[in-house]
């Protein structure tokens, strides 16, 4: 086993990484891609990769950040799906891996495809639902069925038509390459964080550099439509915008790879909130999905209200900390429980507003 800076991975190792992903459907998320790790490394410069070798072959990869003697998933809190990238029957011990790397722990917040029972006590702190839209071959039928189950989606057509009458013709640009529109998306997102007293995920310079690295990844040159030829290894940022007349009323920045769109950072112009332009954009993306080879929209983990209203499939990820020390695992689990208790306090919104005004950077450590 060896650990190397991402930039020093050999071409053979990169191909082995991609080969493992091709053999496991549970590694479909673009957060497992070499391209995502490369973008993070370009933005931060501190991505290491643990490479596990057997019989002179690379059989496992773990991209991570080393902070002190603790490890964190590549991309920190921006990573919505992570795990050791290896064959299902890899038999690689996490304890051995940490010891070989000289690490005390590996903290995770969205560990995929893992049974909490396989880990020592106090490793897994909570299980969190994740959401997706399995569109399949008929997006129009999928959207009709989704609308029949969720009023938010079912009634959106009326709001969008009203917006068209009162503001201007509504149309979607699924793959917008405008840097001005890109910057606007993140201005709106940061304003939303401020309005709702949520940590601004883009306070640190590297976070916006990461978004730009992904956005500036050129679309594949193969075929007539860049969107129709996405394959493993071509993960890239994609900006979609919804216009009413000549105004952008909503936008979304996500990652596209292999027919899977990870829905990541939606935003909208608050001046048009009465038309629910964010939901209008989401429905427009679903409608256009078939034309561009998108078969699944992954909304990620976390039970935000809009995810409950806009999806039909659920899975689970796990939050916790792998560590050789049981005392350290207990400590981290207690921290998680205290945070959950704080979130259930009466008048939590008022408390959150006061705390955010006093400590605007509270929680920033998850991005360091």
Image: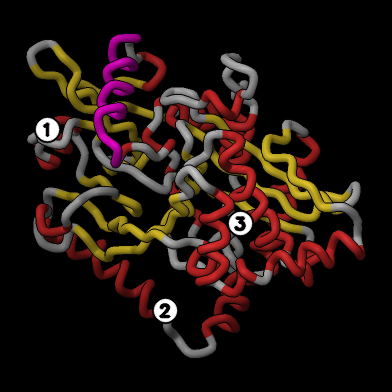
Q: Position of residue 123 (x, y in %)?
A: 18, 58
Image depth: mark 1 or mark 3 in front: 1
Q: Secondary structure at mark 1?
A: loop
Q: Which residue is mark 2?
A: 342
151 is higher (above) or lower (below) than 257: below
**Callout in the foreground (2, 1):** 1
User: Quick check: 130 left or right of 228?
Assistant: left
Q: Nearer the viewer, residue 359 or 124?
A: 124
Q: Which residue is mark 3?
A: 200
- Relative to the observer, which residue lies in front, 362 or 118? 118
> Does label 2 or label 3 sit earlier along the sequence?
3
Residue in the picture at 44% in, 54% down:
132
Give the image location of residue 244, x and y in percent.
Answer: 85, 53
Question: For the residues marked 1 and 3, what is the alpha-carbon distance in whole angstroms?
Answer: 38 Å
Q: Is residue 57 left or right of residue 12?
A: left
In the image, taking residue 216 as reference, residue 188 lies left or right, namely right
Magenta-span inclusion, residue 14:
yes
Marks 2 and 1, how far apart at CA: 39 Å
């Amino acid at each position: 086993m060896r650990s190397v800076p991402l930039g020093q991975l050999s071409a053979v190792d990169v191909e082995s990484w991609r080969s493992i992903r091709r053999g496991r459907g549970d590694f479909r998320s673009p957060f497992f891609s070499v391209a995502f790790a490369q973008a993070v490394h370009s933005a931060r410069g501190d991505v290491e990769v643990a490479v596990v070798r057997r019989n002179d072959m690379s059989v496992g990869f773990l991209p991570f950040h080393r902070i002190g003697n603790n490890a964190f998933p590549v991309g920190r809190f921006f990573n919505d799906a992570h795990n050791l990238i290896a064959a299902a029957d890899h038999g690689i011990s996490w304890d051995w891996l940490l010891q070989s790397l000289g690490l005390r722990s590996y903290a995770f917040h969205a560990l995929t495809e893992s049974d909490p029972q396989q880990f020592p006590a106090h490793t897994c702190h909570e299980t969190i639902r994740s959401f997706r839209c399995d569109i399949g071959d008929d997006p129009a039928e999928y959207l009709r069925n989704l609308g029949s189950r969720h009023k938010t989606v079912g009634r959106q057509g009326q709001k969008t038509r009203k917006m068209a009458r009162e503001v201007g013709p509504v149309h979607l640009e699924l793959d917008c390459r405008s840097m001005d529109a890109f910057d606007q998306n993140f201005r709106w997102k940061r304003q939303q964080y401020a309005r709702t007293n949520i940590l601004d995920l883009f306070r640190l310079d590297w976070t916006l550099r990461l978004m730009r690295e992904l956005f500036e990844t050129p679309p594949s040159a193969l075929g007539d439509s860049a969107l129709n030829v996405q394959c493993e290894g071509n993960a890239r940022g994609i900006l979609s915008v919804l216009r009413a007349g000549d105004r952008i009323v909503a936008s979304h920045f996500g990652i596209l790879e292999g027919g899977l769109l990870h829905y990541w950072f939606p935003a909208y112009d608050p001046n048009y909130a009465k038309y629910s332009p964010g939901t209008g954009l989401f429905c427009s993306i679903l409608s256009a999905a078939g034309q561009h080879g998108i078969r699944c929209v992954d909304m990620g983990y976390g039970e935000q209200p809009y995810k409950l209203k806009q999806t039909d499939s659920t899975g689970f990820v796990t939050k916790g900390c792998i560590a050789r020390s049981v005392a350290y695992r207990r400590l981290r689990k207690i921290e998680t429980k205290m945070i959950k208790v704080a979130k259930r306090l009466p008048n939590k919104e008022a408390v959150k507003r006061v705390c955010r005004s006093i400590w605007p950077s509270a929680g920033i450590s998850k991005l360091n």
